[in-house]
Amino acid sequence: MRISAKGDYGLRAVLDLALRYGQGHIQSADIAARQDIPESYLVQLLNLLRKAGLVRSVRGPKGGHELIKRPEELTVGEVLSVLEGPIDLLGEGEGRTAHGAEQNVLRDVWKEVESAILGVISSVTIGDLCRRYRARRESFVYQI
């Protein structure tokens, strides 16, 4: 199981916006450069996030992007659901069903894993990620 580039890049872009929350509009070229994301792909991701009501975008020379919600009010799960869709480890959204005791037992385990993942990503806010980022940056010591 992997998070796609779409989810990874999108979360990194949201974190970048969150770290600059309250500083006005942030241009996609700046986010792309800091996060090493192809700008054309980043613009597509930001459009998805805008359509979902998570990001506000303004065109023009003084335009850019900003989070609509405060970082403390936005969860990793909300962002990932926009970018990756719902978590569905068993593909039950595709009509798969379990048959037999063995498959039902395995299904129960995968449902527990799915529930644990949902619990974590819906409890971690983008504000939490900002705090973690800043704490790591402050604890980083340059050595020669």
Image: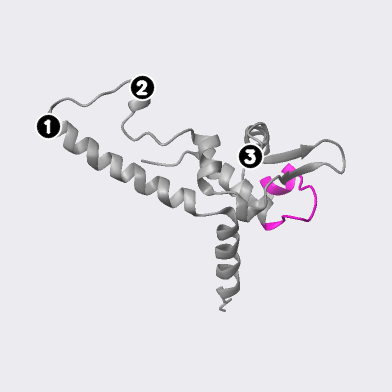
Residue 97 higher or lower than 20, as above or below: above
Residue positioned most to the right: 61
Sequence order check, earlier mark of 2 and 3: 3
Query: Is 139 in front, or is 103?
Result: 103
Which quadrant of the figure has residue 134? Answer: bottom right
Q: Amino acid at mark 2?
A: Glu
Q: Which residues are magenta?
A: 19-32
According to the picture, the residue beneath numbered tag 2 turns out to be 94
Classify mark 2: residues with Cα within 10 Å, few (<14), some (14-19) or many (20+): few
Residue 81 coordinates in the image, percent (x, y): 51, 37
Tell me the quadrant of the picture where the N terminus can be found. top left
Classify mark 3: residues with Cα within 10 Å, few (<14), some (14-19) or many (20+): some
- Label 1 or label 2, whichever lies nearer to me, is 1
| Secondary structure at numbered mark 3 | loop
Residue 82 coordinates in the image, percent (x, y): 55, 35
According to the picture, the residue beneath numbered tag 1 turns out to be 101
Sequence order check, earlier mark of 1 and 3: 3
